[in-house]
Amino acid sequence: MRFIALILNCCCCAFAATHHQCQVRPTNFEGWKAEELSNDWVRLAIVPQLGGRLMQVTFAGHSYLFVNPQYKGKYFPPSNKNNGKWFNYGGDKIWPLPEGRQDEQHWAGPASDVLDDGEYQLKILSQDNICAVRLDGPADPVTGLQYSREISISGDSPQISFHAVMKNASSRPIRWSVQSVTQYDTAASGGGFNRDFWAFTPVNPQSAYFNGYQVRAGLADDPSFAVDGGLFTLHWQYLENEVWLDSTAGWLAVTDNSTHYAMIERFQYFSGADYPGKASVIFYKNGAALELDNHDLPAIRSSTREESPYYMEAEINSPMIRLTPGESYAMDTQWFPTRAGKDLKGVTDTGIIEHPLAAHSTMKGLRISGWFGVFYPGKLVAHLYDVHGVQLQTIPLQSVDPARAVELHEELEVPQAAERVSIHLIDEGKDHGSLGESKIAHIN
């Protein structure tokens, strides 16, 4: 055992890759003055002028977010002259919930106001090992809210971290939820819309919604939606719809099966908290919609790309929070770009599971297989356990990187007493946790 441990330690030391430090620099993005955060995997384009939006995330050459071609390089400051019109630039931003126009306890958006269109001030907080910026927005006298948000990356993985703060900038108590709203591009590279675009989140086993989700707008029997193996599955189709979920698992996934790129958004769910409409996660599909015309006959509205561009929103909600004057509340979320498609089965702290780990004994030892996407670079290591849970052996496997899908097919020599195997991801001596675990199926 001491010899095995020595091999493992040396192997991991040899693998400890040297990553470049992250960088922060000013840039021009699609005609807007922007700030870019980058490392060896990701490049973020932040445009403070557009309500503090993160306008694009590019990972291993793949761009995730929708950028509205109608407004590229343009800016429309909040003004009463806009009569509540919404200028949808795209990208990622934060909004308040609940929405509505019936009273002061609802945000009359999306609309051109200081929360969505106000110019934010950007400050660089740190560079090199961790690159972080803070975006401070103007106070909104209508809602009483003032937003700020920190966005950061490091040099050793593609993980993106967000710290969103809503503050009561008024002289009265207020009560709101803060919402992360991300518009993903669902256009196909060759024209038209992407017919192989998917989204997932675990269904709450004790959901307050029928079938585990609630359609809030659009067709109740929209063929885009399904529940399979405890996962709510959305196959994007060009039909406008909004669906709410009271998921408690703390993650959602968006995948492009045509390119096998995925984004995992993680958040903390607070059991027993009062979420807006009970929803912790919302998906919105932009697209054509059915409505009644002037003669009360069914008609299709917004059925062209110009009228209704190709995108989908993934939204994460905080609980409803009461804030006294000057009081603040923060929501922390993390994004993990990686490689995966529509076969997603689950998410761990280390990566995505597409084909769960399987382990079978052979005449020579043990055959393991699985298909994954990882959040961090490093090396996979097999941990073998006996029937009592005692660790018998650790075996270094293959090197992995978030920019590459992981197909695991290996045959190992293991002790006969091995009954269980767990695959961990190790990077520079740090154990990120298990990617998958399986009992060993023994041959007769």
Image: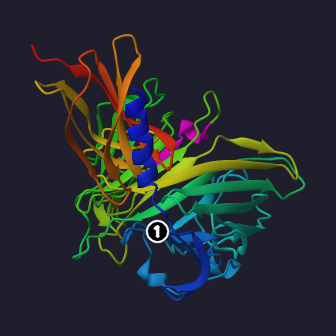
Query: Which residue is tagged 1?
Result: 40
**Left or right: residue 406 compared with residue 92:** left
Which segment is the magenta one? 275-282
Q: Position of residue 165 (x, y in %)?
A: 72, 55
Q: How many marks?
A: 1
**Left or right: residue 165 compared with residue 411:** right
Q: Amino acid at mark 1?
A: Asp
Q: Position of residue 361 (x, y in %)?
A: 17, 23
Q: Secondary structure at mark 1?
A: loop
Query: Which residue lies at the image location 75% right of the left edge and 58% below the top edge?
Result: 143
**Where on the picture, by quarter, is residue 171?**
bottom right
Query: Which residue lies at the image location 36% right of the left edge and 72% below the top edge?
Result: 61
Looking at the image, can residue 109 be seen? no
Asked whether 11 falls inside the magenta stretch, the response is no
Task: Report the colour scheme.
Answer: rainbow
Q: Position of residue 310 (x, y in %)?
A: 34, 68
Asked whether 276 falls inside the magenta stretch, the response is yes
Front-lying residue, 168 or 120: 120
In this view, the residue farthest toward the front is 3
Front-lying residue, 262 or 317: 262
Front-lying residue, 286 or 49: 49
Front-lying residue, 113 or 64: 64
Query: Which residue lies at the image location 48% right of the left edge and 35% below the top edge?
Result: 249
**Where on the picture, by quarter, is residue 26?**
bottom right
Q: Position of residue 92 (x, y in %)?
A: 53, 64
Neighbour tally class for label 1: few under 14, some 14-19, many 20 plus, Cα within 10 Å: some
In the rendered view, tell whether residue 132 sits above or below residue 76. Answer: above
Q: Quadrant of the N terminus?
A: top left
